[in-house]
Image: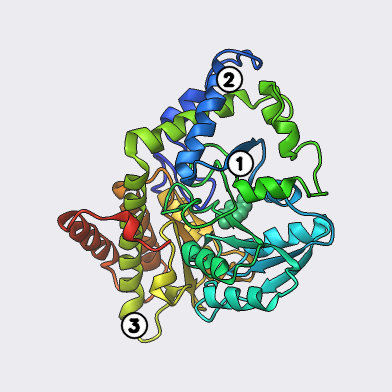
Amino acid sequence: MSLSHGKKVLAIPGPTTVPDEVLQAMHRPAVDIYQGELVAVTEQILADLGAVFRTQSAQPFIYIANGHGAWEAALSNTLSRGDKVLVLESGRFAIGWGETASELGCVVEILPAGAHGAVDPQAVAARLAADKAHAIKAVLVVQIDTATSVWNDIAAIGAAIAQTGHPALYMVDGIASIGCVPFEMEAWGVDLALTGSQKGLMTPPGLSYVLAGPRAVEAHGRADLKTRYWDWGFRQGPLHYHKYCGTPPVQMLFAAQRALHLLLREEGLEAAWARHAALAQATRAAVQHWAGAAEAPPISFAIPDAAHRADTVTTLRVEAPQNAEALRAFCAQTCGVTLGVGLGDARGNSFRIAHMGHINAHGLLGILGSVELGMRYLGWACPSGGVEAAIGALAQILDGPQMTPSAHKG
Ligand SMILES: *Cc1c(COP(=O)(O)O)cnc(C)c1O
């Protein structure tokens, strides 16, 4: 029997649910791409990106591309063939960005994650201090790794880099975090930051945003990897058309404008951070409950250290003989909820619950309830009551003192 007929829910960490208002904003004919309304839309999006990334000094660029495109834009505008790049590993995504750098002709060195799965800021400082010749030209890190659901402390890594006085550019991938958790491009000394439209920013996939701080813009003058499509120089030409290096993605821009309006002016950025923090805490309360009681729990957090668990996605390890894919299939086919797959080697033995973007309390509780139903149906030895634990966590947050998102870890 299926109970899935009704509104389907996507609980994968990207693409995420697009608000109806955003879909409606796209549903209109194209307009003049040289003057008028669309030029104002571009200007509004560019200004809003500064507010989302928390910077006044960075130059924003919009690409018709997904996150992989933003990676290439960041590297090709700032680096040259043979430049050394230090990749701070913490799961799958920084490694992917590093592979892009190596394919572009950079020399990639990987600094392994610390024991807790997150980047260790002191290890970054030690590596840069040892690079007396300043061979390393850029440091690449991901704020939240969407595979492992680890949350790196971008402020602390920035401070560690600054403390060495090393001139390497500090570049951050915030694709699974910007708009959802605190990110302070300017205050944290980030030289370049990027994100995609389709995760925290509640827009269909297809746009990405790169913000270049003054040192990244300066590096652009020396870089020899530039090509026409990605090049910031061409994109600063006088015509609106130049900003997109060709035809602007008209309907996508109306969508992005509406989504940024929802985030910045209807909800407020800090309120969105607090909502993500609360829903993540509820998710963790449920998982803690499911994993807590049994001696050999069928499921556990992929990130053992609570301080490094992300507020946008939670990755769960699943012990054999339980199979994560069976749970995902049950949730999709019987409940209408699609959970995230385990990435890489972790496919059968992990799954991911996204709590990112356009999601509220009732959405999250429905997802957690479906997971609990699935575990019970499949006979996993997890105690019921995880949803009750999530409700308890939310009740406590709602009763408690006003959350101060700026107190949350970067
Ligand atoms: C999703 C994601 C990417 C890749 O983005 P695409 O749009 O799939 O190319 C890169 N980094 C992080 C942290 C992500 O979550």
Q: Which residue is mark 3?
A: 294
Q: Nearer the viewer, mark 1 or mark 3?
A: 1
Q: Residues within 10 Å of mark 2 (few under 14, many from 20)?
A: some
Q: Are marks 2 and 1 in contact (CB under 8 Å)?
A: no
Comes first in the chain, label 2 or label 1? 2
What SS does tag 2 mark? helix
Closer to viewer: mark 2 or mark 1: 2
Q: In this orientation, does residue 278 appear?
A: yes
Q: Which residue is mark 1?
A: 208
Q: Residue at x 45, y 46 (%)?
A: 179
Report how far apart the C-alphas of labels 1 and 3 lie in the structure: 44 Å
At horizontal 67% and vertical 29% (from top left) the residue drawn is 243
Q: Which residue type does callout 1 highlight? A: Ser
Q: Amino acid at mark 3?
A: Ala
Name the residue beneath numbered marker 2: 39
Q: Quadrant of residue 306?
A: bottom left
Query: Distance between the Cα atoms at labels 2 and 1?
Result: 18 Å
SS at circle 1: strand
Residue 25 drawn above or below residue 397: above
Q: Is mark 1 within 8 Å of ligand 1?
A: yes
Type of amino acid at the residue the image marks with label 2: Val
Name the residue rendered at 76%, 49% in the picture: 76
Work out which quarter of the rendered image holds the C terminus and state it: bottom left
Distance between the alpha carbons at the discs numbered 3 and 2:
59 Å
386 versus 278 height, above or below: below
Percent position (x, y) of residue 177? 48, 53
> Residue 397 in the image: x percent, y percent?
22, 58
Of 99 and 214, nearer the camera is 214
Vertical side of 280 occupied by 2: above or below = above
